[in-house]
Image (cartoon, rainbow, N blue to C red):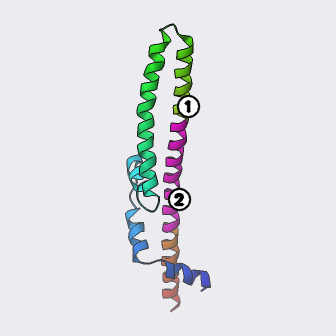
Amino acid sequence: MTDIDDRIRGALDEDDKAFLASLEEDRGLFRQIGDSWQGPMGGWAKFAFAIAVAFGIIMLAVGWQVIQTMHGGNAEEHTIWAIVLLMVLTMLGFIKQWMFERMNMLTILREVKRLQVQVAMLQQQGDGEKG
């Protein structure tokens, strides 16, 4: 038995085992989004989601303006609205990228926790066979 094994086993407690049990079922997209709203960065995740919804609504309004100015004859106004639409789409893309990166990070954390519990359980089985 090494020092790292003792530290891993000591770091795992009932909370970690309960956390692992809660992660056993498959999680869909909406469940993952909801899970990202928990924890220390949960407030920022909620804020980013609200901003993404706001930018989605702005994108629809600006898109409508692009369509309305297409037949109006004023090419300059149409070009400005089209540029604003591209800017809003870019900002929305960055926000969604951050949200999906957070969800992926939580998925990786979930797998690391699962491995920690499995290592500790294997260590306990090994200790039981030796003793």
Name which residue type carries label 2. Ile
Looking at the image, residue 121 lies above or below residue 55? below
Q: Earlier in the sequence, mark 2 or mark 1?
A: 1
**Residue where numbered disc 1 is placed:** 87
What residue is shown at x 51% (from left), y 53% (from top)? 102
Looking at the image, residue 42 lies above or below residue 71? below
Residue 54 coordinates in the image, percent (x, y): 42, 37
Q: Is residue 123 magenta?
A: no
Q: Is residue 106 magenta?
A: yes
- Dominant SS type (magenta): helix
Quadrant of the rendered image containing residue 76: top right
The magenta span reads 91-113
**Could you classify mark 2 by the number of other residues whose Cα lies within 10 Å: few (under 14), some (14-19), or many (20 or more)?**
few
What residue is shown at x 45% (from left), y 52% (from top)? 45
Residue 3 coordinates in the image, percent (x, y): 61, 85
Q: Is label 2 in a helix, a strand or a loop?
A: helix
Name which residue type carries label 1. Met
Q: Which mark is residue 108?
A: 2
Residue 95 coordinates in the image, percent (x, y): 51, 43
Looking at the image, residue 24 lies above or below residue 49? below
Quadrant of the rendered image containing residue 36: bottom left
